[in-house]
Every structure is written in C-alpha cells, then in structure tokens.
Amino acid sequence: MRTDTDHKLRKLLTDVLGLKPGQADGFDADSGLFGYLPELDSMAVAGLLTEMEDRFDIVIDEDEIEAEMMETYGALLAFAEAKRDR
Amino acid sequence: MAPCSLSQRRSATDEVMAVKPLGWSCPTPDGDERDEYALAFDQGRKPRLLIIPALFDEGNKLRRFAVEVMRRLDGAGVDSFLTDLPGTNESLAKLTTQSLDGWTAAMLAAANTFRASHVLALRGGSLIVPKVIPGWSYAPVKGATILRQLIRARILAARELGREETQDGLLADGCANGLELCGYKLGANLVRQLQEREPEARAGLAVIDQDMIGGSGLWLRAEPDEDREQADALAAAVLVGIAR
C-alpha cells in the first residue's frame, strides 16, 4: 500500500510536470527524474523542492540536496519519507 | 453591471482588433518618466482591471494564463491591462535599479493612466499592489519565498558547474551588492525588500486561493502551460466581484 508521502509526491510531480491525472501512478522506484526528464532544469527542481517543503511541512537545506536523490522516483520518495520522519 | 456569459466568444478578427499594445508613462527611480508597455483589451468600458504580473520566472509561466483570463473578461464586457514591470519583459529600464517600492509606484501610475476601477495581482504581484483601488490577490506569496527559490535554483546550477554556494552567503551578498538569479540581475534594494515584504492584507483586496480555482497552480509547471477551466474560474471570480 502507498504511504501518504508517496501519494502526495506523485501529486506534486503531476503538478510540476503537467502530467495527466493518473499518469504518475505509473512511476516505480526506478523511474528516472532529473537527467531523464528535460523539463526538470535547475529552476524546476528548485520549484519542486520548495513545494515539497510547503506540502510536507519540512525544511530542505541545500547541502542535503544530492544529485542521486533527484535521479529516480524511488530516491526522491526515500528522501521525502526520511525528512518527514524526523 | 451585468456580466455576459463567459462562453461569449468573438471572432478571431474582432479579437485581433480588441487586444493591443499600449504605452504608458511610468515614474523612474531617479524622478524622471519613461514609457513602459502594457497589453490591453480596451474599449473604453467602465469596469477596468489592472493586472499586475507575477514576478520573474513565475511571470513568464503565468503570462499566457493571464491573457486567457483577459480574453474572457473582454467577452464579458470588462477592459483589462496587463502591465510590464519596469526592467522586465519589453521594458528598456535596467532591472538593477528597480525595487518593490519603485514597482508599487509604477503600478499606481499605471492604475491612474488606465483609469483602473479594480486590480488583480498575480502571485508576487501582490507585493506591489497600489492601495487606492479594490480588487483581488491571486495565490499571493511572500517575497522571501520567491527569493529562496531563485537562490536555490542558482545554487543547483552552480553545483553542476562544480561551484558551491549557500543560501545565507548569497543572501548576505545580495543584500549588500545585489545578486544575479536565474538571469535576473537584482539590485540590493530589490533583494532586501523581497526578503522582508509579505503580501498586504487590507480591506478591499480579497485573496483568491488556488483551492478556489481548482487544479494546481500553473506557476508550478516546469514549462509554461495553460488551463481553460482555471482561466474560466479566475475570470468568473473577478466578474462576480465586479458585479457586486
């Protein structure tokens, strides 16, 4: 079963990438994000992270942002889950 | 006034004639005046809406949405004016000399020039709304949030080039010397005022949250996009308010 964070993160990617409803349901842990989706430039990633802070009520420091966490959906979800558990 | 149906549409030829670029005289920071640009649907009608654009990258992402809202308002009998902020879009003024106070004065001048009866501020445009006319603030955002996101984008881009920068370091430098963020060269005044200013809550300026419009805000999109239903909803909210 999907966690609340998982649901919200899919919704957020839908909003940022302008996906059709349900399209983000197809993401699995290995789905490529940054580096695979040309829309996700540094401005879009900054927007995504700022919106994550808002919707998950977390604060993300720049030194926590690593290239690996933006590479796949699974890595970004793991980061969000870990931040919300803290 | 009684707004017409939102579904009322003009022919393409009518619309080309209805929408036009306008020049308006804008006060400059050194006390002079200079012409700035606005996109206008102007037929000399009584309800006249000044639209203050969102700031920086969000302004680009919401421009098409703003024009879609203007088309609907035009069809319903409302004139509207989407102004440039000095130093942005078609403006020949330098962005480095601008400030939120200067932009607020510019928007007051635009409101007077266009004899605006109402104002609609989009996102960060809510930080520079003239106090003299009633209207709406769509999805207002704090200046510090806008700044934080722009600085974050710069840090991420710099890191790809092997350069490490920090929020605190860039912000301190920006407040003292100005800062280039995502291609926007901001002067120290603008950086300092963004860091401090929040959208003003005042009587006569109603907040329209994204929840009232439905869907997700188009400023979030990685690429500029449009949404017919959202444009319908925002135009309808404005028309209901004007009719009151």
Image: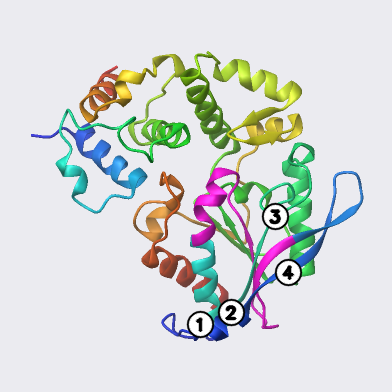
Give the distance between the C-alpha atoms of the residues marked 4 and 3, in whole angstroms.
12 Å
Q: Which residue is mark 1?
A: B12
Q: Chain of mark 3?
A: B
State which region is magenta.
B37-64
| Residues marked 4 and 1 touching at CB (< 8 Å) | no
Sequence-wise, the earlier of marks 2 and 3 is: 2
| Residues marked 1 and 2 touching at CB (< 8 Å) | yes
Sequence-wise, the earlier of marks 1 and 3 is: 1
Q: Position of B92 compared to A38: left or right?
A: right
Q: Nearer the viewer, residue B173 or A37?
A: A37
Give the distance between the C-alpha atoms of the residues marked 4 and 2, in whole angstroms.
14 Å
What residue appears at the point 7 percent right and 34 percent down from the top-left corner?
Answer: A1
Q: Chain of mark 1?
A: B
Q: Nearer the viewer, residue B179 or B50?
A: B179
Looking at the picture, how far across and down is residue B5, in whole percent? 44, 84
Q: Which residue is mark 2?
A: B16
Q: Which residue is mark 3?
A: B90
Kindly indicate whether the residues beneath marks 1 and 2 are on one polypeptide chain.
Answer: yes
